[in-house]
């Protein structure tokens, strides 16, 4: 598609309005009018293709800032984006995130063509366990409620009683009638659930599988101690995929959506965000007065998304970019997610 110089200039200025605040850029770029001009033809074309094809782009906060602010229609955490996928009336849902998120969108919006820009965008948690592994755990603990974190494949969700996200996990697990819970696939989140429920006075036995998030498992308490010594008044904000030691040493633990709300509502001189760097980029744009001292890490899977891949997939998706699911499996997985919506307070 060709765009006039004035259309490109106006688009570059629109992009700059957000991107100028991004200091924590995954590629170390300094956003200015020139760098925005370079991507403006791409964002213009993608936004045009969305209109022509009745497509919507859901963006997780961890993807690159030019995707979030250039072409994203909805940006947020896994729970928010699942709701948006369920409500969507678009013919095409393009998920700028990772494959399990796109699968979740397909489960919830089966009539739509759901596209994932890069089929290799896995997740160390989702890829750690299969449906057969869950069936084995169910046979070992037949009295347990089987709960999966949303960072799991459709095949795993289809085997579980209820799905949870980082935003509702504690409330949902606490509300289940069963005393014994099989929780997959995040071993570190299982530790955090045990601790949180103990604090709430809720007695549950949590049995977990052995997955971890390759990004969040790397944060450690030493990093927190050093940062606190160097930056008085610092607030430490972490995700429940971190170790229990990190979670306990943090001022706030929550989903990426809850982390954003906490930072926006908290007057503090500095924040240490123990999560993927994309969230820091979002906060720099949406709360530019706050100071972030670094420490975040990159998720290689989220970073497989790019404007070029999104444009190409919207022009003509390759078969591997279209999410397909067996209908029986989809319905079983949908029951597991619907239960989550019912139980979310
Ligand atoms: P959120 O649902 O909190 O955004 O988490 C998704 C994720 O993949 C965290 O690593
Ligand atoms: Fe998966 Fe971790 Fe990447 Fe989130 S940050 S998508 S949990 S590997």
Image: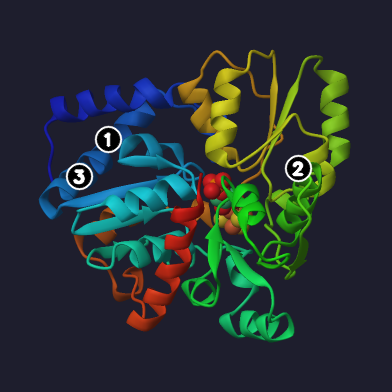
Q: Position of residue 182 (x, y in %)?
A: 69, 70
Q: 251 left or right of 93?
A: right
Q: Secondary structure at mark 2?
A: loop
Instruction: Judge depth for marks 1 and 2 and give the one in front.
Output: 2
Q: Is residue 61 above or below residue 210?
A: above
In the image, the residue with mark 1 has its CB under 8 Å from the nearest atom of ligand 1 = no
Gap between marks 1 and 2, in whole Å? Answer: 50 Å
> Which mark sits nearer the N-terminus, 3 or 1?
1
**Within-10-Å neighbours for mark 3: few <14, some 14–19, many 20+:** some
Gap between marks 3 and 1, in whole Å? Answer: 8 Å
Residue shown at the point (50%, 53%) measured from the top left: 343
Q: Quadrant of ligand 2?
A: bottom right
Q: Is residue 327 above or below residue 96?
A: below
Residue shown at the point (69%, 80%) measured from the top left: 137
In depth, the one of 290 and 46 nearer the eye is 290
Q: Which residue is mark 2?
A: 200
In depth, the one of 101 and 19 nearer the eye is 101
**Within-10-Å neighbours for mark 2: few <14, some 14–19, many 20+:** few
Instruction: Judge depth for marks 2 and 3 and give the one in front.
Output: 2
* Residue 40 marker: 1
Q: 320 left or right of 314?
A: right
Q: Position of residue 226 (x, y in %)?
A: 87, 28
Residue shown at the point (57%, 19%) measured from the top left: 265
In the image, the residue with mark 3 has its CB under 8 Å from the nearest atom of ligand 2 = no
Gap between marks 2 and 3, in whole Å? Answer: 51 Å
Q: Which residue is mark 3?
A: 45
Q: Secondary structure at mark 1?
A: helix
Q: Position of residue 246 (x, y in %)?
A: 80, 42
């Amino acid at each position: 598609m060709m765009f006039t110089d004035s259309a490109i200039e106006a688009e570059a200025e629109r992009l700059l309005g957000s991107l100028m605040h991004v200091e924590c850029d995954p590629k170390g770029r300094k956003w200015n009018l020139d760098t925005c001009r370079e991507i403006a033809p791409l964002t213009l074309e993608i936004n045009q293709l969305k209109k022509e094809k009745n497509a919507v782009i859901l963006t997780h906060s961890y993807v690159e800032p030019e995707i979030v602010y250039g072409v994203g229609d909805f940006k947020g955490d896994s729970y928010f984006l699942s709701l948006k996928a369920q409500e969507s009336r678009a013919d095409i849902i393009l998920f700028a995130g990772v494959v399990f998120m796109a699968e979740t969108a397909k489960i919830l919006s089966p009539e739509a063509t759901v596209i994932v820009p890069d089929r290799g965008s896995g997740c160390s948690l989702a890829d750690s366990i299969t449906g057969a592994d869950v069936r084995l755990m169910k046979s070992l603990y037949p009295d347990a409620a089987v709960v999966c974190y949303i960072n799991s494949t459709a095949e795993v969700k289809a085997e579980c009683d209820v799905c949870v996200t980082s935003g509702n996990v504690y409330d949902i697990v606490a509300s289940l009638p069963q005393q014994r819970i099989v929780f997959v696939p995040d071993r570190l989140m299982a530790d955090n659930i045990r601790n949180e429920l103990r604090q709430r006075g809720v007695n549950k036995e949590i049995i977990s599988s052995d997955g971890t998030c390759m990004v969040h498992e790397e944060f450690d308490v030493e990093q927190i101690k050093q940062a606190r010594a160097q930056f008085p008044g610092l607030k430490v904000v972490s995700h429940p995929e971190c170790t229990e030691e990190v979670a306990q040493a943090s001022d706030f633990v929550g989903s990426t959506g809850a982390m954003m709300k906490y930072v926006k509502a908290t007057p503090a001189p500095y924040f240490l965000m123990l999560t993927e760097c994309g969230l820091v980029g979002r906060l720099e744009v949406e709360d530019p007065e706050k100071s972030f001292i670094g420490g975040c890490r990159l998720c290689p899977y989220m970073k497989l998304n790019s404007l070029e891949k999104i444009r190409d997939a919207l022009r003509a998706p390759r078969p591997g970019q279209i999410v397909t699911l067996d209908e029986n499996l989809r319905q079983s997985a949908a029951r597991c997610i619907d239960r989550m919506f019912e139980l979310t307070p």
